[in-house]
Image (tube, rainbow, N blue to C red):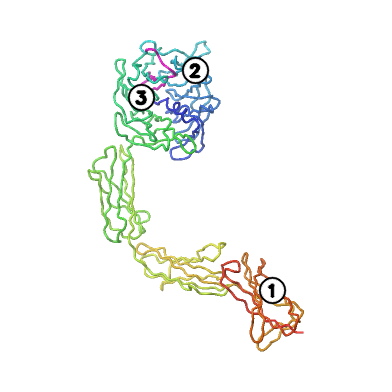
Amino acid sequence: MRSTSAATALAVMFSSVALGVAAAGTASAASAVVTSPGGLVVDDALRRVFVSDQADGQILAADYNGTLVAQASGLDNAADLAVSDDGATLYAALPTSHEIVALNAADLQVKARYPVATNTGPRHVAFAGGKVWFSYGDQWDGDLGSVDPAVDPTTGADPVALTQLPTEGTGIGLWGQALLDTDPLRPGLLAVGETGDSTGTEGVLDVSGGTPKVIAWNDNSYELNDGLGDIDLVAGNDQLLVNGTDRHAWANGNLTKAGAYPGGQLADVGRSGLIAQVTGTKVAIYRPDATRPVRTYSTGTQPAADVTWAGDSSRVFALVAGSAGWTVKALTDPNLNVPTLTVNAPATATRAKTLTVTGKLSATVPLPAGARLSVTRTDLESPSGKALPAVTVKADGTYSFTNTPPAGGKVTYTVKYAGDATHTTVTASDSVEVSRASTSLSLNNNGKLYNYGTDVKFTAHLGTTYKNRSVSIYADPFGSDKPKKLIKTGNVNADGNISAVVDMTRDTKVTAVFSGDARYKPKTVASTAYARVRISTAVSKHYKTAKIGSTSYYWFHKNTDPLLTTTMTYYPGRQQRFDLEVYYQGTWYSADSQYFSLGSNGKSAITLEAAGESGIRARIRSVYVNGSSGDTVNSTTYGAWKYLYFSN
């Protein structure tokens, strides 16, 4: 049973929004998109959902999981849909080409086309009494027609019959193309709702025989409604549900008000009698004549465009707007109320001391007396959870229990109600930070400076712990090109020590990490050690080496330019600082200091202009300066002085 009006009515409002077919909460294996939804119907026999696309002339079929299984095109302006009682045939109204088309529901192949002799419609369709019923006409001369699939047109008989609206008991007839609804549990009945004016004519017809007969009819202006946007036959009761809210009972040919659900816009009535009502941006499920919903689903930022029940009442399909457009979303377990469960644990607690956890279980549908809750504690000692004694809910829905946490750190108490015949499962949890003792952790070599390439042993020392004696040591060399790396992990020795060797080619931050255990907090300590660069300077073009005093000099003729080649540990963009000093009257004086780039091989060759006179003493050195030599990955390093003497 379904309401045929919603998709058409809201398609006008949301015609620019695309529709995708998807399962509830998951993406379809194959996604289908339509630009203007026309009709929505469920085939119980095949367990499929059909949706039509007016703008693109398509009909899409998805299974109950939302996966696209079939698609038909070339159905211009496909509007409302209906399924035969056996589920084998899908019928679609095509108002542009003025026909009813029959498709094989299994593969959406066209089986037959039934032309309708009208200039307006057909628009709405329903299947009852073995026939397809459709509405057609404009606001001045709306009427009812039928297609009898049992009639073979090749015999000369016409399966299409027009002007089927009874003239007796229907007043002046219908304005416009009426909304139609049927119910497989009420075979032969057809609900009719006028759309052509605001007075809202509505009625019930018996279409089980050769010609329709009036069961009940009301065309008194504004007596029952202020205009119709949705109409449904109510399962198990002689009632109509109008606009998703008002119940109108029929008896002795008349319709009268019989109560209402809280305000909604449209609805569908399941075979179980449950109501799926679109109310704002929610879909609410009501039991017959109830005033509080059994369950409520959110539809996002916009109202659902249509809803329809699965035949077994296991789910409701709602046409919901999402980021990709309108989607057919399966709302599961609609007959089960969703309880509310709270858990309140203290924010902090002391390990091995008793604490109290409280909470409440409540629902809009009464819970069974003595409902029991399962409780699980998850902590560092029991990461997979440890079951605690079950808790019984009091008459007012509250509960409490005490526990003594054996482990410190984050302790989570998870409480679960397993559900019952009328309620879903519900789970809630809360965490408490339980105290842990502190331990000591140290790491040597902080602040020490080493020559380039020295293998340095870093030793971490761990104090008292409970069970965990593992420490991890990480090395993080300076420079973004070398990430932090785990170099050692394992249990400390009997003295509480664990060591790892670092090749000191750069300044390096070394970190020791104790991850903690059930009784002792995690701890992290760090040491930063520093590494010089490797520097050497080669001197060439001299004619000899000899000492002046106790110092060895490279001897150059006074007009020979010394070639000084520096080799330094390479790093992208690195420069060496070249220092020059001259000796005069017993003192060395700075003559120049410049930076020169290193080649990718780490070399920098400099020609020193000759003195041009004899008796000149000079010295040179190469220096890496942290921060000034183009990077900060090593510590400032001074090369050795090289001494030069210029003679005749």
Q: Quadrant of residue 271?
A: top left
Where's residue 108, x and y in %?
51, 27
Nearer-N-terminus badge (3/1): 3
Secondary structure beneath dot 3 equals strand
Count of picture labels: 3
Q: CA distance from mark 3 to mark 2?
A: 25 Å
Quick check: is 4 in the magenta stretch?
no
Q: Is residue 72 above or below residue 370?
A: above
Label 3 Cα crowd, 10 Å radius (few <14 / some 14-19 / many 20+) = many
Few, some or many residues within 10 Å of mark 1 (<14, 14–19, 20+): some
Q: Horizontal placement of 547 versus 73: left or right?
A: right
Which of the numbered marks, if any, corresponds to residue 95? Answer: none
The magenta segment: 171-193
Mark 2 surroundings: few (<14), some (14-19) or many (≥20) residues within 10 A: many
* Location of mark 3 (residue): 242
- What SS does tag 2 mark? loop
Look at the image and tell me in which quarter the C terminus lies: bottom right
Residue under circle 1? 565
Q: Along the polypeptide, which appears first: circle 2 or circle 1?
A: 2
